[in-house]
Amino acid sequence: MTNQEIPNLTAFDDAALDQAFAAVEAEARAAASTLTDESSVEAFRLQWLGRKQGRLTEISARWLKSAPPEAKKSLGLRFNALKDVVEGLLSQAAGSGPTDAALAAEIIDITLPGTRRLTGAEHPITRTLNEITRVFAALGYSVGVGPEVETDFYNFESMNFPPGHPARDTQDTLVVANQERRPCALLSPARFTATTRKMRRTRPSSTRSKASASTPTSPSVTSKAHSTTP
């Protein structure tokens, strides 16, 4: 963008002011029509609205300050109108988005295979737990999973802990709040709740054949994690 030197005004009548401001506005519109990217928009902003060397600052210094008192009002109105036009051109250029050429340069072929993410390694604790489970499964044990929230029966009564039993006081028991029903539900404090559920669903080993009764095939590896019940 080339800057034409702001001429000094020799006349301050309405016709001369209209002609001078019209010429500057035409120059601003011509410069705004050539903006294609963010760098050119920023250069336009500095060229016209810069506080130290902007063209509007130069117009204010050359025209407003040298104008006679009776012309300052009409000149100031035209100056404000010109400033609004320049700011509008800048806003329009900044909000127009990238050009077709810029978009074409950044085009991405979506048919190409994506970037394959590397899968992480199995955690040592998880790997150890799975190995223990495989060992006990090979010995004839089964795996059972119980809920995280259990009833009082599976937590205490099925283990022969009646109400008021001292063993209840030693458990790290977290009861679900705002319960109106009984028996109440609470977070399972131990692993044997899944074992109890498994034993209630599994037929006793005495009903199996004598051949299978001689092998350790009835117990289960059960719990919300996994507990071993021989």
Image (cartoon, rainbow, N blue to C red):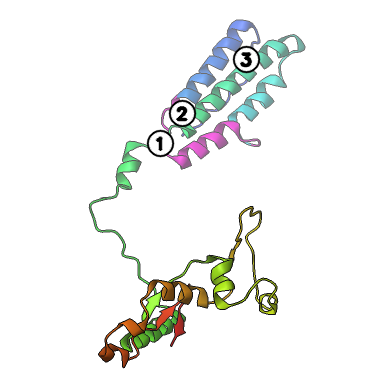
The numbered mark at residue 32 is 2
The reply to whether residue 183 is visible in this rendering is yes
**What residue do we see at 47% from left, 23% from top?**
29
Q: Looking at numbered disc 1 in the image, what kind of residue is underneath it?
A: Thr
Can residue 141 be seen by looking at this rendering? no
Per the image, label 3 sits on a secondary structure element best described as helix
Question: On the rendered image, what quadrant is the C terminus found in?
Answer: bottom left
Image quadrant assignment for residue 51: top right
Reply above or below: 230 against 98: below
Disc 3 designates what residue?
78
**Label 3: how many Cα within 10 Å (few below 14, some 14–19, many 20+):** some
Q: Is residue 135 placed above or below 93 in the rendered structure?
A: below
| Image location (x, y in percent) of residue 176 | 62, 60
**Label 1 crowd (10 A; few <14 / some 14-19 / many >=20):** some
- Given residues 27 and 139, the one toward you in this image is 139
Which disc, if any, is residue 36? 1
Real-space CA distance between mark 3 and mark 2, rounded to the nearest whole angstrom: 20 Å
The residue positioned farthest toward the front in the image shown: 207
Q: CA distance from mark 3 to mark 1?
A: 29 Å
Residue mark closest to the camera, 3 vs 1:
1
Magenta stretch: includes residue 131: no
The reply to whether discs 1 and 2 touch (Cβ–Cβ < 8 Å) is: no
In this rendering, would 218 be left or right of 169? Answer: left
**Number of the label disc, if any, that sits on residue 169:** none
Q: Which residues are magenta?
A: 30-52
